[in-house]
Structure formats: structure tokens, C-alpha cells
Image (cartoon, grey):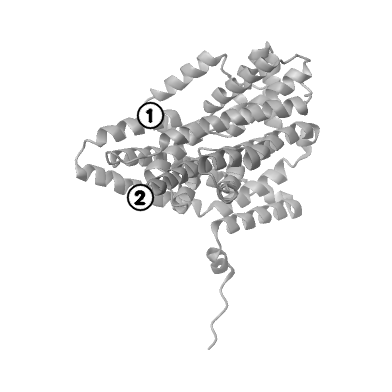
Amino acid sequence: MSASPPSLLHTLKRLSLVTQIVIGLLAGIALALLAPDVAKSTTFIGKVFVSALKAVAPILVFVLVMASIANHKHGQETHIRPILVLYLLGTFAAAVVAVIASSLFPSALVLSTHDVAISAPGGITEVLQSLLLSVVDNPVSALMNANFIGILAWAIGMGVAIRHAGETTRTVLDDLSNGVTLIVRVVIRFAPLGIFGLVASTLATSGFDALLGYLHLLAVLIGCMLFVALVMNPLIVFWKIRRNPFPLVLTCLRESGITAFFTRSSAANIPVNLELSKRLGLHEDTYSVSIPLGATINMAGAAITITVLTLAAVHTLGIAVDLPTAVLLSVVAAICACGASGVAGGSLLLIPLACSLFGIPSEIAMQVVAVGFIIGVLQDSAETALNSSTDVLFTAAACMAQEDKAQASA
């Protein structure tokens, strides 16, 4: 008796997660083109997937960071410092790239009156105050509101305190970390279905008509992000590991960037990045801290968005920009990006702060924010893909450099 051929579901289960995601992407596009009314009803599927990721991300960060620090042995290297240097260097370099691109290909905006009620920070002092208040936030409130700065602060504090607890307590915490990780893996397995819903509903509902008037601005934004992802980041990684960086770069873009492109949230993509870091064989004590930290402060895409949109407003208004002011904008954009929210569209809220450097009133700056929301279908997706994939890329580069150093000294 001959064996029956495998079912379609069984065949799909044998494919890699990335292949399944690509299939979900293509199926979503096909459904939006062939049956847009049906595609609109898939919004719920995408919302459930993103909500599940956002639900597990805060507790995952809290438990994993706390367990990692609590079980960290004295004298064991975690390589966090070189990763922080790469995060800050990459964010600043992205802002510089955006300044140069905006000077070479200036964009002009049609600043119409959009009634967008957004509370934006009024200056660097206010941003720093907001960050400090986030650090000392109530831990329950931080978990409920996905305040990752506050979650990281409490996780680090509790982890350091529990390091002095008994072995049994630290073992229980490690078991809890494994349990949360298992739940996250289950959620990630539904990524192809979730992306299918997100793509189908987005294309069927919004389409690309709203983007036609801003193609030049989009081209500059996405061009900068592609340049950083495929040129600047590989250069930084090559400087760090001294060998061909592209296999690592392309792996991070494929396995982290694709998912982040559709979830449009660095925070929601934390579980995906942790899973990828494990598959890459990175140091667990390192990536369990650096990945959540990167989702908060490693914001190259956000720095590009803030810089390009601000300079587009400057060009539209005919304001002259000298070199020192452009450099200052790069610094401010990098600082602002580090304080940008890990949720979709978070970087847009900090554009008025950068606009204030050029004396642009908040009324006009908020119109620029509105333009950002109009092009957000592609801009925010590309921004998040760059941000999130770079978290894994720089973590892997630092770990690989440390391994090379250890082998050389052996």
C-alpha cells in the first residue's frame, strides 16, 4: 500500500519560518488585488498577531533581563559596552547620511492644515526629563503601558538584587524565563498568518494613492535607509569584525527586517530578535540585555525620519542651513531617536523638537508630522525594519569580535 502524499498544511510546516512569511506576504498581496472587500476583513488577523507580540514583549523583557543578570556569574563578560558604542555610532551615522541626502536631493512639502492633536516635546530638557520619569516609573505601570525604559530599569535593579539571593530563587527565575520564552516561540510561529492579515488589509484599505504626492520625499527617506542598511552598517560591522559583513547583514535583514517591516514596532519585534540571536549562537547573557535595550535606544531609522522631514520643512520655507547647524541637527536627531517610542509612528512625535532648531513654529511643525503620518505606510515600516534588524546585527558583530579576540589570545 503506497503512502499518501503529505497534506498542504504538513508541507507548509516543514518550510522555514522566513519562507512561510514570504508565502503569507504574497498571499496577502494577491488577496488585496483579487478580492479587496474580503482582504479588508483580514484586519482582525493582523491586529491579533501584533497585539500578541506587544502583549508578550514587556513581560519577556522584564523576566529575561532580570534572569540574565541574576544568573550572571562574577567575571563573566557580557560585551554590552561595545554594543552600546555601535548603537550610538550607527544612529549618529544614519543622521549624517540623512543630512547629506537632504542637501543633495531637497524635498518640498505641501504644508496644508491637518488638524492633528499631538503632544510633542518642547526641547531637549523636556526629552531628558521624560526619559528620567520613565526610568522611575512604577513597575506595574511600566509593564501595563509598555514603558520599556522603566521595564529595563526595574529588571536591571531586580536582577542585581536577586544575584545575592539563594540558588533556588535564581533557579526558579531561570525556569520562569524559559517558560516565557516558550510562549513567545508559539506566538512567533503565527507570524506568517499575522503578516498575511496585515498586508492584505493595509493594501485593500489604504492602497498607495495617498503616497503619490510624496514620492520624492519617500524616495529620499527609503533611499537613506537602504544606504544605511546596505552600505553604512556593513562598513561599521567590517570595522568591528574585519571580515565580509554581508552574510550577517543579509541574514538580519531577511529574518528580522521582514517581520519588523509589517509589525511596524521595534518593541513588538523583540521576541523575533531574541529568537534570531539564539539561532545565530550569540552569547545569551549579552543578547538578552542588548536586544531589549536596542529596541529603545538603537534608532537609526528614526534619526533618518526626523532629519529628512525636518530638512524638507526647512527647504520648503527657504531657510538657509549652514554646516554647523546641520551637524547640530544630526546630534539632536540621534538624541531624539534614542528617546523615540518603540511603537509605530513614535519618531514623528519628535519632529517639532528638531524643527525648533530652525525657528519653525509648532503650527507648521505639526503639519510636517501630519505629512509623516500620510507616508507612514511605507516610511514607518522601512524605519522599523532598519531599527530592528540593526539591533541583532550590532549585537552579533560585538559578540563575533569578542570571540575572535579570545581565539587570537588563546
Pick the front one: 157 or 201: 157
On screen, residue 348 above or below 123: below
Pick the front one: 312 or 28: 312
Q: Amino acid at mark 1?
A: Ala
What is the crowding at mark 1: few (fewer than 14 residues within 10 Å), some, or many (at least 20)? many
* Location of residue 96 in the rendering, given as x and y in whole percent from the top left corner: 64, 27
Q: Which residue is mark 2?
A: 179
* Location of residue 387 in the rendering, given as x and y in whole percent from the top left corner: 57, 37
* Location of residue 48 in the rendering, given as x and y in whole percent from the top left corner: 54, 46
Q: Which residue is mark 1?
A: 153
Instruction: Tell me which residue sits at (40%, 41%) in the image.
Output: 286
Instruction: Tell me which residue sits at (58%, 19%) in the image.
Output: 120
Residue, far bottom: 1
Instruction: Tell me which residue sits at (27%, 38%) in the image.
Output: 74
Circle 2 — which element? helix
Q: Amino acid at mark 2?
A: Gly
Residue, far front: 409
Q: Earlier in the sequence, mark 1 or mark 2?
A: 1
Image quadrant assignment for residue 100? top right
Q: Is residue 373 left or right of residue 260?
A: right
Circle 1 — which element? helix
